[in-house]
């Protein structure tokens, strides 16, 4: 628990460093450009499709009539943008996570290693392609679980719990792996994952709940369409900052755990290392040829 809290506050302090804040601008610029391009080409078409589906639903027609009777008929104009936004948000979160993992996490891990663990030897055997494959496989698994659990989101308490849990699991898988990729061997990585699984999952879930906060900005953008162009980059920047903080938190925690692991005494199996007695020398033969 002490290491968990200590690494948390160290990550917060590192996030305030000018270099870290400037580094977060690169994923932000890429994501804003991609989001603006997608919005420019597909926003109107997506809204039309969602509105057509809503108008074709008999259940939704009865719902509109009930909202009109109670004086909330204006919500009809808000629902379609909200559906589009909350449908696209998981994809944006996943892309942000991948961009941060590829563009920021290695540099942030090196920053933590240089400042806190300069003597920590690099024994990592995870190549860039293995790290990318791990991140993509984990992201795909999280998206599949997200799609399968969408029906449960209509249960009011679960929509506040399930998405942060899924993104927390994804954050734990990606960030913990990348934090140890350069310094830990495969065996050391497995040991740390096994010993600290609960703490790493808690860290991921906390980051998952932090990552859910920009959804409020997305919702505000749907309600105030005039400010949506401004609020969208703000939400993406918040996502980037959350994942940058997650990278630093996992780097501090995992590298400290690795340093402690290497300071442990090596237990050697006595039976395996017992020296066999040397064979007695054969007596010299005195027979003549």
Image: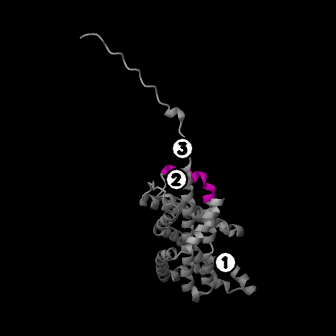
Q: Is residue 59 above or below residue 166?
A: below
Residue under pointer 3? 266
Front: mark 1 or 2: 2
- Which type of secondary structure does the marked residue at label 1 adopt? helix
Residue 117 at x, y percent in the picture: 51, 60
Alpha carbon of mark 3 to alpha carbon of mark 1: how far? 66 Å
Question: Can residue 212 be seen here?
Answer: yes
- Start-end of magenta stretch: 186-200
Magenta span main SS? helix
Q: Residues within 10 Å of mark 2 (few under 14, many from 20)?
A: some
Q: Position of residue 68 (x, y in %)?
A: 72, 86
Picture quadrant of residue 169: bottom right
- Mark 3, secondary structure of its residue: loop
Based on the displayed image, in which of its 4 quarters is residue 125 positioned?
A: bottom left
Vertical position of residue 254 compared to residue 25: above or below: above
Residue at 58% x, 87% y is: 227
Q: Residue at x 42, y 61 (%)?
A: 128
**Can you identify the residue that label 2 sits on?**
189
The Cα–Cα distance between marks 3 and 2, rounded to whole angstroms, is: 17 Å
- Report helix, strand or loop for mark 2: helix
Task: Compare marks 1 and 2 and give the one earlier in the sequence.
Answer: 1
Decide: marks 3, 2 in contact (CB < 8 A)? no
């Amino acid at each position: 628990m002490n290491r968990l809290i200590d690494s948390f506050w160290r990550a917060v302090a590192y996030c305030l460093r000018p270099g870290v804040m400037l580094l977060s601008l690169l994923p932000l610029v890429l994501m804003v450009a991609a989001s603006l391009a997608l919005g420019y080409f597909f926003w109107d078409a997506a809204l039309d499709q969602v509105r057509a589906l809503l108008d074709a639903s008999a259940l939704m027609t009865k719902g509109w009539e009930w909202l009109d009777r109670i004086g909330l008929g204006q919500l009809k104009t808000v629902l379609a943008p909200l559906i589009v936004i909350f449908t696209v948000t998981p994809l944006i979160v996943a892309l942000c996570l991948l961009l941060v993992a590829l563009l920021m996490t290695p540099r942030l891990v090196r920053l933590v290693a240089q400042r806190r663990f300069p003597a920590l030897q690099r024994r990592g055997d995870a190549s860039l392609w293995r790290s990318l494959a791990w991140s993509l496989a984990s992201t795909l698994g999280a998206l599949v679980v997200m799609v399968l659990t969408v029906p449960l989101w209509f249960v009011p308490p679960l929509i506040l719990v399930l998405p942060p849990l899924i993104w927390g699991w994804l954050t734990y898988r990606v960030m913990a792996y990348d934090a140890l990729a350069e310094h830990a061997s495969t065996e050391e990585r497995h040991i740390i994952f096994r010993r600290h699984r609960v703490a790493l999952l808690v860290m991921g879930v906390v980051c998952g709940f932090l990552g859910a906060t920009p959804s409020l900005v997305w919702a505000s953008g749907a309600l105030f369409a005039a400010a949506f162009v401004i609020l969208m980059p703000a939400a993406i920047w918040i996502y980037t900052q959350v994942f940058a903080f997650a990278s630093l938190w996992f780097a501090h925690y995992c590298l400290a755990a690795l340093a402690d692991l290497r300071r442990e005494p090596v237990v050697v199996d006595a039976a395996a290392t017992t020296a066999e007695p040397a064979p007695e020398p054969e007596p010299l033969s005195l027979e003549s040829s």
